[in-house]
């Protein structure tokens, strides 16, 4: 009988004991969202800017053109001019350029007097001081070079691509390795420096 009472007592003690604690299941929780916005990568600037320059073979500047959108800055002999396009004209401080319908243009005084007429075709560029393009300077594209002539077919020089630069005649050069006919304008010795620089700038800018 005593043994039976002991067994009942054990059962009562077991029943009254608190249940063993169970480990709470681990619940993965996402980290709280950051209140700091991610910084996007800055896009590369796109200004449409380009620079073209002709120097002497020893690095002295001859003509430099910088374009930005429709604006042009041209530098030669220490002089700087700025051109801004409005419609079919681009006005510089002392000359204006009037564009034609076929890719050519006229360089004129600010009161409209013709200085130079430039005619552009895929094969050549003509530069003349009259409306009829009579007796022009000519930049003729011949395969991998441009031959530059004064009126009367007098050869002024050639533009050629060399291994690491562009050769402009015997004494001038430009950076790059792509043939561009407008570099030959630097050889037009009888065209005054101001107009020569403007013609170079307009052809380089591609108006």
Image (spheres, helix red, strand yellow):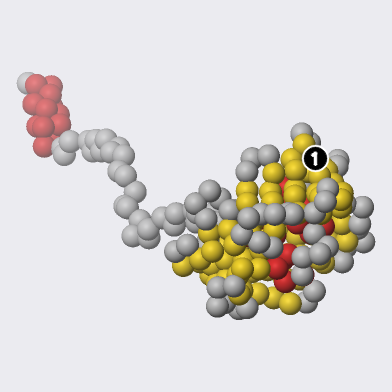
Question: Residue 156: where, in percent of width, then height?
Answer: 86, 52
Residue annotated with mark 1: 145
Q: Quadrant of residue 194?
A: bottom right
- Name the residue rendered at 88%, 61% in the picture: 56
- Number of marks drawn: 1
Q: Element type at marker 1?
A: strand
Q: Is residue 4 left or right of residue 19?
A: left
Does residue 137 lie above or below 191 as drawn? above
Q: Local crowd at mark 1 within 10 Å, few (<14), some, or many (≥20)?
A: some
Question: Residue 181: where, in percent of width, then height?
Answer: 72, 47
**Can residue 45 be seen from the camera position used here?**
no
**Closest to the observer, 45 or 155:** 155
**Can residue 110 be seen from the camera position used here?**
yes
Considering the image in quadrants, where does the N terminus appear?
A: top left
Question: Residue 118: where, in percent of width, then height?
Answer: 64, 56
Q: Quadrant of residue 50?
A: bottom right
């Amino acid at each position: 009988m005593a043994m039976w009472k002991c067994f009942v007592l054990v059962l009562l003690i077991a029943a009254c004991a608190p249940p063993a604690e169970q480990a709470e299941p681990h619940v993965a929780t996402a980290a709280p969202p950051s209140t700091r916005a991610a910084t996007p990568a800055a896009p590369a600037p796109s200004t449409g800017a380009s620079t073209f320059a002709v120097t002497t073979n020893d690095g002295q500047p001859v003509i430099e053109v910088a374009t930005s959108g429709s604006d042009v800055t041209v530098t030669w002999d220490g002089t700087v001019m700025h051109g801004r396009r409005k419609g079919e004209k681009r006005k510089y401080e002392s000359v204006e350029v009037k564009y034609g319908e076929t890719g050519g243009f006229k360089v004129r005084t600010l009161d409209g007097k013709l200085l130079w007429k430039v005619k552009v075709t895929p094969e050549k560029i003509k530069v003349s001081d009259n409306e009829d393009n009579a007796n022009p300077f000519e930049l003729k594209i011949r395969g991998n070079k441009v031959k530059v002539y004064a009126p009367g077919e007098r050869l002024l020089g050639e533009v050629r691509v060399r291994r690491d630069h562009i050769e402009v005649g015997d004494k001038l050069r430009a950076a790059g390795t792509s043939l561009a006919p407008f570099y030959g304008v630097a050889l037009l010795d009888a065209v005054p420096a101001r107009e020569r620089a403007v013609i170079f700038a307009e052809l380089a800018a591609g108006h």
